[in-house]
Image (cartoon, rainbow, N blue to C red):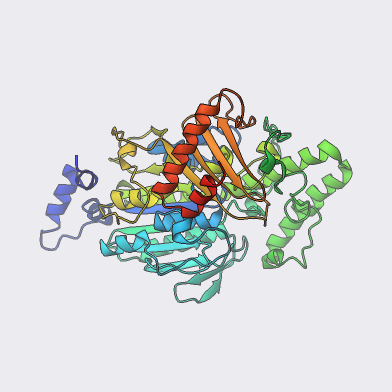
Amino acid sequence: MNLRIGVSMISAAAVLAALLVTVPGYKPKESEAQQTTRPNVIFIFSDDHAYQAIGAYGSKLAKTPNIDRIAREGAILHNNVVTNSICGPSRATLLTGKYSHLNGYKVNERKFEINQPVFPEELQKNGYQTAWIGKMHLGALPHGFDYLNVLPGQGQYYSPDFVNGKGDTTRYPGYVTNVTTKLSLDWLNGRDKSKPFFLVVGHKATHREWLPDIQDLGAYDNVTFPLPATFYDEYENRDAAKNQDMTIDKTMRLKEDLKVHLDYDKRGAYNRFSPEEKKKFYDYYENKISKEFDEKKLSGKALVEWKFQRYLKDYLATANSLDRNIGTLLDYLDKSGLAKNTVIIYASDQGFYLGEHGWFDKRFIYEESLKTPFVIRYPGVIKPGTQVNQLVSNIDWAPTLLNLTGTAIPKDIQGVSFLPLLKGQKTNWRQEAYYHYYEYPEPHRVAPHIGLRSSQYKIVRFYGPKDYWELYDLKKDPQELRNLYGVKGYEAIAADLKNKLKDQIRKYKDDEALRIVEGGE
């Protein structure tokens, strides 16, 4: 079946609705009108939300009923990987469908080159109304959007500022996740209803420093989280893992990250509270959490494990508002009649460590950082309960969105539509995924590296400050604790993976990486 025709097939009820609109004086309900058109798309995009923190991905402790609902009513991607595990570059890849070396956004806190093509421009050409509301984190406002209202930089959790497409800044009272949802609903209600729409809802949660909504303070205080099996990893034969600066033990700060005896006056984020918000925040973190910390007089492993517990409690409490607001959006789609013809996606910009290897943050090609959640619902097209196990990359997001909407996919996009996988069709899909991380040394001293992940193996080339290889067998060693590079019996596997890595580098035109790999045999 031609995919574009397949996406736009209309049910008998929709055909009847289409005929009725020709009757003089007949005014269809919005739900009827939408069924006769191409699908709307809402892309909910969070920050640093780990797949391990989602019920649909197996978490037994995190409360994510609304993300789980999207997965249950549509498809879940189990091996959705990123090309560069860091916030801004991931967003640039979403917009361009290209690797960082081609879209120019390799590390955070730069300015996105706005004169390059972005896929929402193609949607506009195809009659879509487009908007991005919430966190964008690209240092510039890209083309392709009829409406923009985004957080400057990382944004703030409380009383956040938003910058519109004209560069005007407005401060909104309240909690950022709630504000982002309200602004999104305002735009949905006020949009041009004669056009299909594409909306990105960009959430700040669950980014560091993990400030929960007031109503979620202490939501997980009665939970004791099990230590990950790799929490006390000693990083044997893994130099980059040993020399990073992202451990819960040494890097995570008691005051700023875990709110032990905060400086409420000098730290700007806390000057944005209303008096009522500040009192509740102070009562919880100063009178309860800081008091508990003082009384325990912790040191050594007991201190590290206390920090781990506090980290997860704050992280997951922050995620509560994220999921609750997704539920608000789902309810709106149901009540407005838009749900039947709206593709809704939930994804995060990359994975995140929740204590695995003793870490927080992301960056590494290792699994917890490389894989990111992605669930998608499209009634009538994607069968509920669909499981996608193939390797999907975030360069594939843009072409898939274009494919879903019957929009032509530009030839310079490097990704491929995975709509056939969502529809359960057999297709000749990729067997490997290519990765390139750059940002060094600040802020977390993760060495830059190039790598390849297949269904069973992963090979990595670190190229600064030291040059060396790593090799992992993901079936025998899913936690990636044993570096097999140079181990007897794995020579042929390493050589084969190196050749495949070079093939991928050439395919994606990463000339810098090719020089590094060919120079480090």
Residue drawn at x 64%, y 47% as measured from the top left = 315
How many marks do you count on the picture? 0
Percent from the top left, x then y, of residue 325? 50, 51
Residue drawn at x 47%, y 57% as measured from the top left = 101
Viewer-proximal residue, 128 or 29? 128
Q: Is residue 418 left or right of residue 38?
A: right
Residue drawn at x 64%, y 29% as measured from the top left = 482
Q: Is residue 78 left or right of residue 301?
A: left
Quadrant in the picture for residue 297: top right
Viewer-proximal residue, 16 or 301? 301
Q: In the displayed structure, would residue 191 be above or below residue 205?
A: below
Percent from the top left, x then y, of residue 426? 29, 32
Viewer-proximal residue, 277 or 121? 121
Quadrant in the picture for residue 229: top right
Q: Is residue 24 left or right of residue 190?
A: left
- Image quarter where the C terminus lies is top right
- Image quarter where the N terminus lies is top left
Q: In the displayed structure, would residue 438 be above or below residue 70?
A: below
Percent from the top left, x then y, of residue 518? 51, 45
Quadrant in the picture for residue 28: bottom left
Percent from the top left, x then y, of residue 251? 74, 49
Q: Is residue 336 visible?
A: no
Q: Is residue 233 visible?
A: yes
